[in-house]
Image (cartoon, rainbow, N blue to C red):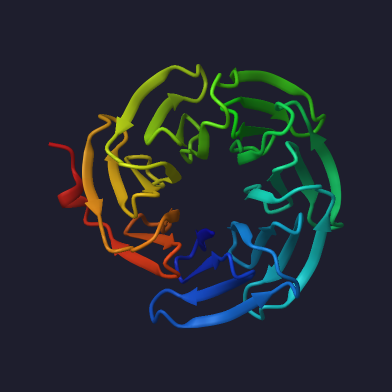
Amino acid sequence: MALAFSSNGRVFASGSLDSTIKVWDLSTGKCLHTLSAGYQAPVDAVAFSSDGRVLASGSEKNTIKLWDVNSGHCLQTLSGHTNSVLTLAFSSDGRTLASGSGDGSTKVWDLASGRCLQTLTGHEAATGVCAVAFNKDCSQLTTAASSGSVKVWTVSSGQCLRTLCAPSNDLYPVFAVAFSDDRRIMVSGRHDKSIKVMDAASAKLLHTLRGHTDAVCAVAFSHDAHLLASGSWDNTIRIWNVASGKLLRTLRGHTGYVYAVAFSRDDQLLASGSLDKTIRIWKMNKDTLKAP
């Protein structure tokens, strides 16, 4: 399952285990489009382009679909991965798309032609790439794998510039990874019920957040990087202060695992998606979420 808000805050998208993507009107809660690729494959990733006109979706059919948000029409299909597409990120200029896969590779795509520009390999064999993020000028790409390793790449050449984190000794300890918008902080949700907050440049551990009572399978920063949301197999969402590591709020209501969380562009709303087949929209009251 996956969730994403458009940059204009008017719509959001959800990808589901039922193989569909739904585009929702945020003000009314009405479903505007139900997008189907025509085959049965859970949708593991969704992302909007910076202008909100294009939606990318990645599935366990190993492909990426690009959709026109207004019409719901499929614009093109990107093929090349040999395992599920787990994560997607558009460059800020909207010209390229990065995809991370369960095949251990990251691909960079030219959206005008649909051509794969780079295939980045270097993460451990049989480990999935679960997070990708461009830097501000789109010259570099940071990738994180379920093994715990993090690498920075030059987009133009495909060269690995540096490895920030070596893989963990545990077997697939990382379920979810997210970067702050300024790429200064990285968090990882883990099978051991913890969340690691790290400096993305030095890989220094800043905080270990504990409070969930089961595995943490979804993490997302607010766009101002002040708050962190985490979703868990314990059916809850927890809101944390990033600077202090303090737990601010526990959100309850789902009756199944929480597999996806996402903040709206203005950080006023949080969406959560669950195995209970519902999406909940939570209003973030910043006054009550301040660390004491």
Q: In which quarter of the image is the C terminus?
A: top left
Residue under the image location 36 percent in, 42 percent down? 214
Instruction: Please state which of residues 244 and 215 is positioned toward the viewer in this rendering.
Output: 215
Q: Residue at x 75, y 26 (%)?
A: 122
- Please determine whether, in this image, residue 32 is positioned above or below residue 78: below
How far from the left and from the top, in percent, is residue 75? Answer: 77, 70
Q: Can residue 49 be seen in this view?
A: no
Q: Residue at x 64, y 37 (%)?
A: 137
- The spot of residue 273 in percent (x, y) is 44, 62
Q: Position of residue 235 (x, y in %)?
A: 34, 55
Residue 33 in which image quadrant: bottom right
Is residue 10 toward the left or the right of residue 206 in the image?
Answer: right
Residue 34 against residue 255 in the figure, above or below: below
Instruction: Give the camera-side residue of 131 and 41.
Output: 41
- Please identify the quadrant where the N terminus is shown: bottom right
Residue 23 falls left or right of residue 279: right
Question: Tag count in the figure?
Answer: 0
Left or right relative to 36: residue 269:
left
Residue 161: quadrant of the picture: top right
Please tell me whether residue 69 is drawn above or below residue 3 in the rendered image.
below
Residue in the picture at 63% in, 73% down: 69
Would you say 285 lies left or right of 263 here? Answer: left
User: Image quarter for residue 275?
Assistant: bottom left
User: Is residue 290 in view from this perspective?
Assistant: yes
Single out the residue that lies furthest toward the left. 292
Residue 254: % across, % down: 33, 63
The residue closer to the viewer here, 291 or 258, is 258
User: Is the residue 130 above or below the residue 262 in the image?
Assistant: above
